[in-house]
Amino acid sequence: EVQLVESGGGLVQPGGSLRLSCAASGFTFRSYEMNWVRQAPGKGPEWVSYISSSGSAIYYLDSVKGRFTISRDNAKNSLYLQMNSLRAEDTAVYYCARDGTPGQAGTYFDSWGQGTLVTVSS
Amino acid sequence: AIQLTQSPSSLSASVGDRVTITCRASQGISSALAWYQQKPGKAPKLLIYDASSLESGVPSRFSGSGSGTDFTLTISSLQPEDFATYYCQQFNSYPTFGGGTKVQI
């Protein structure tokens, strides 16, 4: 069974930093492209970042470019999101999500974690 | 960015009803569209991908159709567990989601 478990969320002041982690199990992690998707309270989901299976290709939502960094450790079956210079509008539940078609960049998301809440407030 | 407009934003229905939700893209996206179901406090769940392919394990009462700019999600006979919010998502370019349709009693 595919499992994605996020951690690292919490309350942070504007301008602060957080590092989210996603532990993957139940599938061959190194073969799949991965994403972070967020959902602000009462809003629809919003894609944040993508990383290819090898880590060689990375894409970001324009509003997080230069502030967020996605990375992965295939030896540890883990995905990460380093978030710096956080703003109030970054407040959301952050999900890690697996691409539905291995080897094909940017598709749909066939497996999601339970999410971790990030709250940016003073 | 490609914008997706869902309609209606909410609807009231009864068990056994046939429900149709539409999603319109701001430009052509071929069949690069997925549908998700989300219940309160839970992650979205994939229902349909490539506009009309049913995800494994999803009941056959769910179906998707369309290509280009206009897409439809249909629930043929609404069940109690189907009351939820539904989102479309395009993956022709950087992924974007529609605004959601809340299906309620």
Image (cartoon, coloured by chain):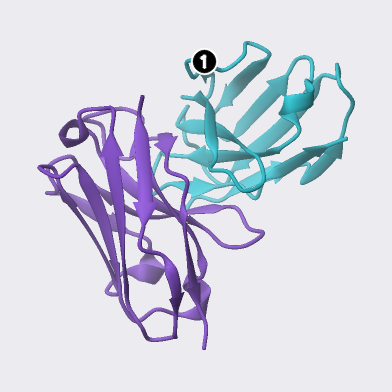
Seen from this angle, which residue lies furthest top? B60
Front one among A109 and A81: A81
Give the cyan chain's letter. B
Quadrant of the snapshot with the N terminus of chain A: top left
The residue at 71%/37% (across/down) is: B84
User: Does residue A109 appear in this view?
Assistant: no
User: Does residue A77 appear in this view?
Assistant: yes
- Quarter of the image for residue A17 reads bottom left
Q: In the drawing, does residue B87 fall left or right of residue B105?
A: left
Q: Colour of chain A?
A: purple
Front one among B6 and A17: A17
The residue at 33%/40% (across/down) is: A106
Where residue B65 appears, as percent x and y from the top left, is: 61, 20
Q: Which residue lies under the disc numbered 1? A: B57
Where residue A57 appears, as percent x and y from the top left, is: 17, 49
The residue at 65%/50% (across/down) is: B99
Instruction: Name the kind of residue labelled 1 in the image.
Output: Gly
- Quarter of the image for residue B45 reads top right
User: Looking at the image, is A39 positioned above or below residue B81?
Assistant: below
Badge 1 density bin: few <14, some 14–19, many ≥20, Cα 10 Å: few
